[in-house]
Amino acid sequence: MDSDGNSAADVATTEQRFFNRELSWLAFNQRVLAEACNTDYPLLERLRFLSISGSNLDEFLMVRVAGLAGQVRRHIEETSIDGRTPSQQLAEIHEKVVELERSQQDIRRDLEKLLLEQGIAIAGNGRLNAAEERWLSDYFLTHIMPVITPQAIDPAHPFPFVSNQGMGILLPLLRIADNAQVMEMVLVPAALPRFVRIPGARAPWIAIEDLICRNAALLFPGFRVAGRGVFRVLRDSDIELEEDAEDLVRYFRTAIQRRRRGKVIMLQLQGEFDPGAEKLLRDHLGLDYAIVIKTAGLIGISGLSAIVDEDRPDLKFEPFSSRYPERILEHDGDCFAAIREKDIVIHHPYESFEVVVDFLRQAAQDPDVVAIKQTLYRAGKQSAVIAALIAAAEAGKSVTAVVELKARFDEEQNLLWASQLERAGVQVIYGFVDWKTHAKEGDSYRTYCHFGTGNHHPVTARTYTDLSFFTADPRLARDAGAVFNFITGYVEPKRTELLWIAPHGLRKKLYACIDQEIANAEAGKPAAIWAKLNALTDSQLIERFYRASQAGVEISLVIRGICCLRPGVPGMSENIMVKSIIGRFLEHSRIWAFANGARLPSRRTKVFISSADGMNRNFDRRVELLVQIVNPTVHDQVLDQVMLANLLDTERSWLLSPDGTYTRAEKGEVPFNVHRYFMTNPSLSGRGAALTSGRKVPKLTLRRGAA
């Protein structure tokens, strides 16, 4: 208390109460980058983390930073959750991005040395022998030279457009005949490989820009190359919704085209860039509020993912194959029969996503199924889910697909899927203009439903940890029907039984559960909250957590990415712990657990799975679901296995401090790795009768802290 009787929570400023969203994201990407230094991982997997940190940063710049720059240009002074103006945020972000890029280059150089010791060379000048140089020249003449188009930069030739994520090379030339100066630009087509692998056991890789520069004499006969300047451009790629758009599909198709020509948000310059060439770029690209980064290292760090494909299993994680749930195999692969017997939860990627596809395929083929309703967010380029829906429609079934258009960087693919579904006779709904349809899936004949926390994406399903909940509970079937009526016909549900919908009811339900924990704490009963989310930025929810902490509720949060909540502050959040798990798999499932008057974990705990993160947009501007888990077996798996294992992890966890820094958790005397645990131990719900005859699942306990 201060002299006026106010608590620390009362006098704290917004900056003291909340972390900045954008700076928190940069801290998350720093944790991803730190995994590239983790000697627990094989070498090529460390290179993969470096690449991921690069692609993450690209997206952050193209969307979040571009949005802030747009606000500054339009003189919008709306402050962030922590009280910073857009221009203040941009200044701090620029500084942090430069630091992050410098760290990426340092780590890249270290990894290149280690890779060279293992026979994998990322070639630079002087690293190739004569035979390799000859092969490269032949490759350049055959595969590269016919594709690229050099352009002189002078008053007679307008400056070419450089597309988003486009890379180019500026080459100052001297004509040998008269020593005349010429500036040439070569834009690198996106269709060309980012790195080229030279044949042979030595495994040399060369970046496409180095390959072009090495062979510039072949491209410009009669000229002497006087220098080189490699650059890369990132542009504003966010799509702003027009609520009154008359044709949403046409609007998005146009917006996707506009995105490719958005304002430049970052210019990367590589090496000893020619001063005249740099001035040329600055004059023509329009760099107001853009970040300019000069580096002696590689530009486009994300492209290193190509080298991860090198055929060296000794430098990668041991292959992991997802298990197919025994419960369904016991019913001869009949998903409906297994679900009829008892609710089932599948934990991806440890258990195969193929069961979700099989569920749809069976629905498409079963003559008794008359209707399928499903939402689609990200389905990927090769989607068995889309094929199953098309097959169902062609079989004469009534198929409704709610397609989310604003799925960042997947909008074009979703438009393609929507067109194919419509041609097959599927009723395609494009959701709300301002609300995101994110309840992942439902099949509505009899009482079979599937609720998931993840996307129907064939690639991410192998690396994202998500939950698929299958049920024949008629209450959830009625609720799922109400959700689709809401999405397709604006019919707001008057009442639901086990499911709550955003933007109507989900926030209110979470608040009611938090308030009940507060009341229990004040009454001297056990009171605790466990939650697992990808992000926590909603100020109202954070304030509710602060209030619960001050009442004595013990709160444990697993927040993988952005977290604006400041934990461990006396008088405000001393009862809140926040951790982030970064590892082989990307934690993506959303889980809530409320003690409900008994010590966590227990059978009395209220358990929910959700499609929503703790963000304002998820609660107020998108259609999201919160599903209560009441089946005892599924309840135990989600609470006593998935949630508890995340809290117990010490090997892949980072702890958030009150000052905003993250530190690796102490491994302890008995280290525990949540990903290894689920790779080596079967689930409860999916094993069926195998539980009684096979190896038991190790019991997790809070006291023991390990499996």
Image (spheres, rainbow, N blue to C red):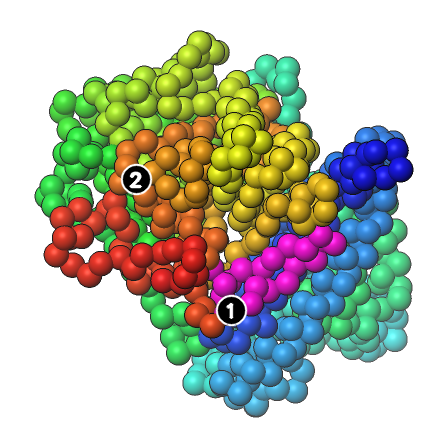
Residue drawn 17% across the image and 46% down it: 688
Residue drawn 38% across the image and 75% down it: 313
Left or right: residue 638 versus residue 63 is left
Picture coordinates of residue 316 (x, y %)? 42, 72
Picture coordinates of residue 360 (x, y %)? 26, 34
- Does the segment drawn in magenta span residue 189? no
Left or right: residue 608 versus residue 13 is left
Where disc 2 sits, the SS reads helix
Picture coordinates of residue 269 (x, y %)? 77, 63
| Amino acid, disc 2 | Val
Where 436 sits versus 194, above or below? above
Residue located beneath label 1 in the image: 667
Q: CA distance from mark 2 to mark 1?
A: 29 Å
Residue located beneath label 2 in the image: 634
Q: Quadrant of residue 294?
A: bottom right
User: The magenta stretch spans which residues?
Assistant: 649-668
Where disc 1 sits, the SS reads loop
Is 361 or 129 nearer to us in this picture?
361
